[in-house]
Amino acid sequence: MPLYEYHCQQCDGSFELLRPMNADDSGIRCPHCGSEKVERELSAFASFSPGGSPNPAPSSGSGCGHRFG
């Protein structure tokens, strides 16, 4: 189950929720103020494998060429 980040438009707070991928965002309330005026934030994550480089060289494949981080 993925961890999603949310931002409250009412109190400007941020929070995280574990949600099923197929669940919609209706009925989610801010834990700080109780408002339902929340929006899911776009977030990035990093993943490292043992022995792997934290900054791998860009591939010559068909990617968009944009690197995050």
Image (cartoon, rainbow, N blue to C red):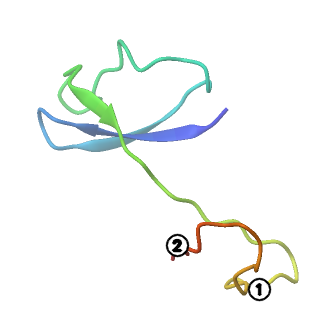
In the picture, the disc for residue 68 is 2
Q: Is residue 33 above or below residue 61?
A: above
Say which quarter of the image contains residue 37.
Answer: top left
Mark 1 vs 2: CB contact within 8 A: no
In the picture, measured across the screen, residue 23 lies left or right of residue 58, that is left
Characterize the local packing of mark 2: few (<14), some (14-19) or many (20 or more) Cα atoms within 10 angstroms. Answer: few
Say which quadrant the N terminus sits in.
top right
- Residue placed furthest toward the front: 62
Label 1 sits on a secondary structure element that is: loop
Residue 47 location (% of width, % of height): 70, 66
User: Which SS class for mark 2?
Assistant: loop
Q: Amino acid at mark 1?
A: Ser
Q: Which residue is painted at 77% across and 72% down in the image?
A: 61
Q: Position of residue 10 (x, y in %)?
A: 11, 32
Q: What's the CA distance linking mark 1 and mark 2?
A: 15 Å
Q: Position of residue 57 (x, y in %)?
A: 72, 87
The label number, if any, that marks residue 61 in the structure image: none
In the displayed image of the protein, which residue is found farthest to the top? 27
- Give, as a three-letter code, the residue at label 2: Phe
Residue 53's tag is 1
Between disc 1 and disc 2, the foreground one is 2
Q: Residue furthest left?
A: 10
Front residue of 36/69: it is 69
Q: Tell me the residue at 83%/81% (across/down).
A: 52
Residue found 56% across the figure and 27% down from its top: 19
Q: Is residue 18 left or right of residue 16?
A: right
Quarter of the image for residue 29 reads top left
